[in-house]
Image (cartoon, grey):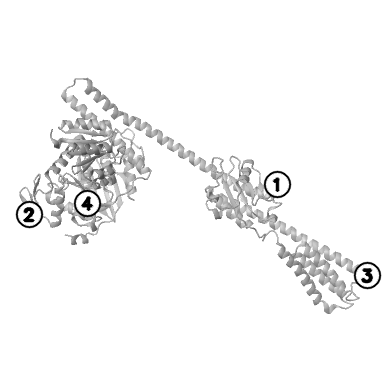
Amino acid sequence: MKGTGRVYGLPLKTRFYQYLLVIVIIGLTTLACSPLSNSQSYHIVSFILLFVVAMLAVFMGIGPVLLASTTSAIAWNYFFIPPFHTFHIEKTEDRLMFISFFIIALLNGILTNRIRRQERLVRDRENQTNALFQLTGELSKARGINKVVEVAGNDFKKHFDAHSWFIIQDGNNRLDFSPFFRNENEAPAIDKTIVEQVFNSSTKAGRFTGSFQEAALTYYPLTGTRLNPGVIAFRIERSVYENRDAFWNTYFTQISNALEREFLGELAIKARILDESDKLYNTLFNLISHEFRIPIATIMGASDTLLISQTSEKNREELYNEIFKASARLNHLIENLLNMSRLESGKISLRSDWCDVNDLVNKASKNLKQELEKYNLVTVIPEDMPLVKLDFGLMEHVLYNLLLNSCQHSPATTTIRVEAAYNNGSFILKVSDSGPGFPPQVLSDVFNKFFRVDGSKAGGLGLGLSIVRGLVEAHNGTVTVENEPNGGAGFTVTIPSEIPDMEELKLTE
Amino acid sequence: MNENKNILIIDDEVQIRRLLEISLSTYEFNTFFAANGKDGLIAAATHSPSLIILDLGLPDIDGLQLLLKFREWFTRPIIVLSVRNSEEDIIKALDNGANDYLTKPFRSGELIARIRAAIRMNEKGKDTPLMEFGSINIDMINHVVRKNGEIVKLTSTEFSLLSLLAKNSGRVLTHQFILKEIWGYGYVEQTQYLRVFIAQLRKKIEDNPANPLLLITESGIGYRFGS
């Protein structure tokens, strides 16, 4: 968690080695120059030493440079200026020479060091600009609040070699601390009071700031133009942190903007979903109030007539029939609504088992006996049709809905075909009728919830075919619709299915 | 009053009780009622009904548990009449000792037919050596099946299956029960065997195998043998 300041500063330990290194280098240079220790060439030594001090200034801080200037001046005086091995200087010109050497070494060192510092500042700024540039780039690509937090955290770690924590609000201006206190061991020293204060006042606090100086972390508000996404907490070295207010403001603004963008995006999506479910709700209620009232009106009207009036036996029988039909219709509506809601909530679980397709077709058509009596039902199932693995009850429902749909949309006495086959590892079931088919432009909407062809006579909620699709998809299958060459509608259900190994069966005979 | 016509109805819905009372009295069944499980147990013990119609959603005890309690001593038919229509519930009820299962809303005609079949089967007992279903005759002693007087050739497995279903005619037998009875415990998952044998049997005994009238499929649950 602690920064080592690799980029922005050097720790004390390294500084101590710098002083030591200065003394060693000056010592070695003096030693190397010892052959020149005579009264003629000691001026040359001064140039060599000045050069060494200048070189040291390029690599070291101001302290070691001062030390280098001083030690080199002393060494020059002691070892090279006659009289040797004393600090005494005889000649006035030599004294002047010594003073100017010292001043030049000092200035040289300080100036070189300053140039280096300038250069380092420029490099720092470049680093900061790079950090901002990279952050902006990565944040612009990140989608979703979690992703933005992840990207920002990684960027912070990369550039400042320190961990950061994002305390993000939940969309209702309440901070969500839960991600940090799930695991006791990993919980950082986040101070809830400070975080709340920073969030509410939108001013920084904590370590190195004006308030809560003694805190373990530094806290910065993440503020946006329309909402405040939250607070960032981090712990970095003083040298890395201080005197960079403008940079930090820009840096955190980038993160805030990205977070705000995601927050607003999510709000927009939520609003759209709400809007759509509102629309669906209205459609559903309009349909229900209409579709339910008709059979209820029939039941009430018919039973009322039966109770109060003296109608003929024939009429009475018809009224009883109407009551029965209306209740059957109500029951069917409720079944469809329940099935739809079960499908949508994922509450339908498959009970796949081996099924005899003959049985399936027989059961579904028997349940629709009354409706199908008016039609010519043609069933085509190959003699060698294998058993297929699917949920019998649900597939019976699929076939029932498809057949009912055909009955509702075809003129009486026409042909309705049911064909079954097993092809390429899939069970294929086709239901086609001789009705008017679908207008080509609505073919893609046929399986949508509450879809009904405009001007269609058939009542209902427009749920039958979307239930078909839901049930088929629960079997990992597909259902398609097309208009047949004769103009009628043709539905094809394809469900991947294995077939049983019948070899073993023969042994049990 | 004929004792065979006493029917106990355990249901907490007044409207359903009224409907059943009227419908059943039309067919000269004598009905009496209980609105919860506890009263139901007492009523069954005191009135000794020939059949019980049981709702699963009772206020005091789950109908499936009540079934088990009844089956500790009550041997006559119990028909479950419930809004619960999932295959799991139906199988559970049959496993717990229900003779039949009808979901609400139901057709009165259907209910009467089921009641009659259940009572008839209970009176007849299971050891009748000669049984007749429409054009089919089954001779349990000699293992001979005749259709319209002509002998139908059946394999031994086919005969076991047919006689099991016939002995329980009118009653739904679950896939697992049939597999266990005919093939044994190790085969309760091998439903493909059952499908194939049922299809073969239909070809041999049904007038129109594509529209069976004797070997009736109960979707996702099992088979019922009826005439």
Helix, strand, or loop for circle 4?
A: helix
Quarter of the image that includes the C terminus of chain A: bottom left
- Whether residue A485 appears in this view of the structure is no
Mark 4 — residue?
B177
Residue A10: % across, % down: 70, 61
Q: Chain of mark 1?
A: A
**Residue located 76% across and 69% down the image:** A20
Q: Chain of mark 3?
A: A
Q: Residues within 10 Å of mark 2 (few under 14, many from 20)?
A: few
Of all residues, the one furthest to the bottom in this rendering is A35
Q: Label 1, label 2: how many angstroms apart (C-alpha)?
A: 105 Å
Residue A370 sits in quarter: top left
Q: Is the Cβ of the residue at disc 1 closer than 8 Å to that at disc 3?
A: no
The one of B51 and A157 positioned closer to us in this rendering: B51
Give the residue type that dot 3 points to: Glu
Mark 3 — residue?
A93
